[in-house]
Amino acid sequence: MPSLRAETRRLLREAGVRPRRRLGQSFLADERVLAAILRAAELRPEQRVLEIGAGLGTLTAALAGSCRQVVAVEVDPPLVALLRRRFAGDPRVVLVEGDALTLTLPPPEAAPAPGERFRVVANIPYAIATPLLRRLLDIGGVLDRCLLMVQREVAARLTAAPGGRSYGALTLYCRYRAEPVVVAAAPREAFEPVPAVDSVLIRLDLLPRPAVTVARPDLLFALVRAGFGQRRKMLRNALAASPALRPFAGVLPAAFAAAGVAGDRRAETVSLEGFAALAEALSAAAPAHPLVMSDEEEDAEDPGGG
């Protein structure tokens, strides 16, 4: 029986695919890592799985043997054609062609039944890891768990504690909605072609309700974006410089005092609870103030990796 790496190379030749770095295409080619994913998925026979970036169908086929149905999303047309041939007539696999960053998730053709919750199991393309994580966290109500293969640096951001370089906006966005747990490491040699980075298998257990209660989640994350957008500045200066928070400028000093958060701290030292306390203090001091969010600030990633 050929090794998984040999089978991966055969499928790539069959599909006429040359993996594209722009799409972060590296395909799982290690039996031990595949087995680790299946163990960590803890699938039940009646469950449905949402797989993003189905690729050559290696993980798809393994998942289909352990659950009721796999809804496999793939954007690359040559890979979609290969997947259609590979899973033709297999009712356990629903193939959806499209971009997971813009598709409705779960896709309409596999809409969840009332009360049903999907489990996401995916080898996330590196190029879309951060925006895709945000999307998955935003639709958490129809998901119970995400088991994701991501590059090591992304896993470090998701699991970081306050005070470190990896701790940032993505850390807090995740902690607001999920509990992250590192499951296993996957060396770069486990993929074909071998990427320039190592990977980590991480589990996100979606919380039944947000980790902190705030009147205005939009204000909470405006504070987070502003704080980490200029993470070298003292927090009071970073917030005062934010266009989105300009309507709150007059009440910022009182809000820091009411929240018990020192304004001379940097964002990377403040916990999710600290940001939530500040958001509540601002909301109480100026309940009618809107956010003034520019497109650039809405889409900004903090330069420290969060």
Image (cartoon, rainbow, N blue to C red):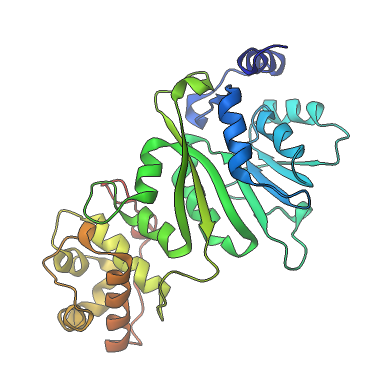
| Residue drawn at point x = 40 percent, y = 78 percent | 214
Q: Which of the two residues, 196 or 48, is positioned nearer the viewer here?
A: 48
Report the side of 231 relative to 13 (left or right): left
Looking at the image, residue 240 sits to the left or right of residue 13; the answer is: left
Q: Position of residue 11 (x, y in %)?
A: 69, 17
Quadrant location of the N terminus? top right
Q: Residue at x 75, y 58 (%)?
A: 111
Whether 29 is drawn above or below 205: the answer is above
Residue 15 quadrant:
top right
Residue 104 x, y percent position in the rendering: 65, 55
Residue located 36% across and 59% down the image: 172
Residue 31, image quadrant: top right
Residue placed furthest toward the left? 264
Q: Residue furthest right?
A: 89
Q: How many marks?
A: 0
Q: Position of residue 281 (x, y in %)?
A: 27, 82
x, y percentage for residue 103?
Answer: 64, 50
Q: Is residue 61 above or below residue 240?
A: above
Picture quadrant of residue 273: bottom left
Residue 283 versus residue 298 in the image, above or below: below
At horizontal 88% and vertical 34% (from top left) the residue drawn is: 89
Q: Tell me: 224 left or right of 67.
A: left
Q: Nearer the viewer, residue 42 or 275?
A: 42
